[in-house]
Image: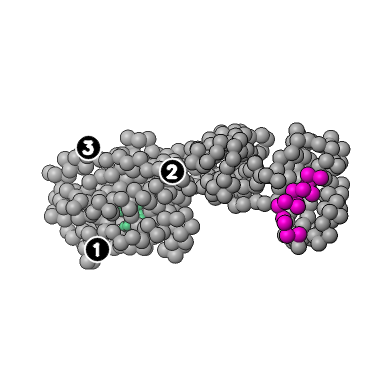
Amino acid sequence: MNFKSFLIKYAEIAIKGKNRYQFEDALVHQIKNCLKKCDGTFKVSKTVGRVYVEAETDFDSDEVITALQHVFGITRICPVVRVPDMGFDDLSEQVIRYMDETYPDKNITFKVESRRTRKNYPVNSQEMNAELGARILDAFPEIRVDVHHPDVMLRVEVREDYINIYSKEIPGPGGMPLGTAGKAMLLLSGGIDSPVAGYMISKRGVFIDATYFHAPPYTSERAKQKVVDLAKLISKYTGPIKLHVINFTDIQLAIYEKCPHDELTIIMRRYMMQIAETIAKQVECQCLVTGESIGQVASQTMQSLNCTNAVCTLPVFRPLIAFDKQDIVEISEKIGTYETSILPFEDCCTIFVAKHPVTRPVLEDIEASEVALKDVIDDLVKTALETEEVILCDSERF
Ligand code: ATP
Ligand code: MG
């Protein structure tokens, strides 16, 4: 019995009242996008509270399931056999065939769970459970019923004009469909944290652009390529990412030359934020996102975060703010960015870092130090913005 269809379940978006259609439409749209990367052609349709993917040609089931596991909003992916509405005897035969072909080894326990949305189907749900169960037991002597902890929960749903038979529910990524919650500018470095932060904000339905600061020749082409690779990896979830690459060298050198060295990191980060915010506004992002987490390093103390926030007018979201490193590592392994993140390439922040950076910067002091930059900084920032390089990062396959 061929699975040619998948029933897509979604949780959170089903409870959104009047906005529900908008959410469902976004989900359907994103499912169509992800299936473009799979072999075969597919029809994606929605009915009340349900989205279906139906293959119209040959396809690779594993590939499609993997693709769907990258679509935010999906909680469960159920390979389903859809049969036309039919009388109960014919349905029983279909169900027995389904069990036979789906579970060649019959040394299993099962339970039937039937539902009817077409209430005038001649057999009610209770009767269906009992009668289908009995017929399956007749057909396969080794099989047993377990109503509490069955190996196989066989679901039979009588809908308006067709019947669904399924028993496998593969977890999806959860979250909200992309395109339902605005757009963010991610400050993306080559580390472990910021790709995870991008994934997490995107999981709430947010599109992302990204900004990367490099400092050639202090940082190499390979360090930049690593960031492009990371953007491509998370784009499997977030959709294509426009990566804005900013040459930060001259700004860093000016700060190095003119400001106290224990304040380098914090001042650098303030300029990074300002530049990222300028680009964010140009491309209509509503917030900035970083991979910062309280206390992880000197630039991520509460006082330091306050000093960087002070230069921004857009909100700065930090999805990892209360996460331990180990928890962040686990997510990065799960989403497939970890191996790339740990490749040992230099980052512009680490090259110009002081031995003993301030951990409790005072905003007035930092602002006073920045006065030393006043003759040069506007031009340097302008040039950095004018020479930005934009790289479209997308993945061809999952
Ligand atoms: P990550 O693992 O994301 O690099 P980190 O623990 O190394 O984070 P920092 O280097 O202090 O921490 O950077 C904190 C955040 O600042 C990063 O998560 C990222 O959002 C942003 N950031 C740092 N360096 C860069 C850079 N070169 N380009 C763009 N954003 C950066
Ligand atoms: Mg870093």
Q: Is residue 168 above or below residue 144?
A: above
Residue 6 included in the magenta stretch of the image = no
Residue range of the region highlighted in magenta in the rendering: 93-106
**Residue at label 3?**
386
Secondary structure, mark 3, is helix
State the residue at coordinates (27%, 40%). Answer: 389
Mark 2 neighbour density, 10 Å: few (under 14) some (14–19) many (20 or more): few
Residue at image location 81% in from the left, 42% down from the top: 91
Give the label on residue 396, or none. Answer: 2
Amino acid at pointer 3: Glu
Give the x, y percent position of residue 142.
Answer: 81, 62
Ligand 1: does it lie within 8 Å of the C-beta at label 1? no
Disc 3 crowd rating (10 Å Cα; few below 14, some 14-19, many 20+) is few
Q: What kind of secondary structure does the magenta stretch mostly adopt?
A: helix
Please tell me which residue is depicted at 59% across the width and 37% down the height of the picture: 57
Q: Position of residue 139 (x, y in %)?
A: 84, 54
**Pointer 1 residue:** 357
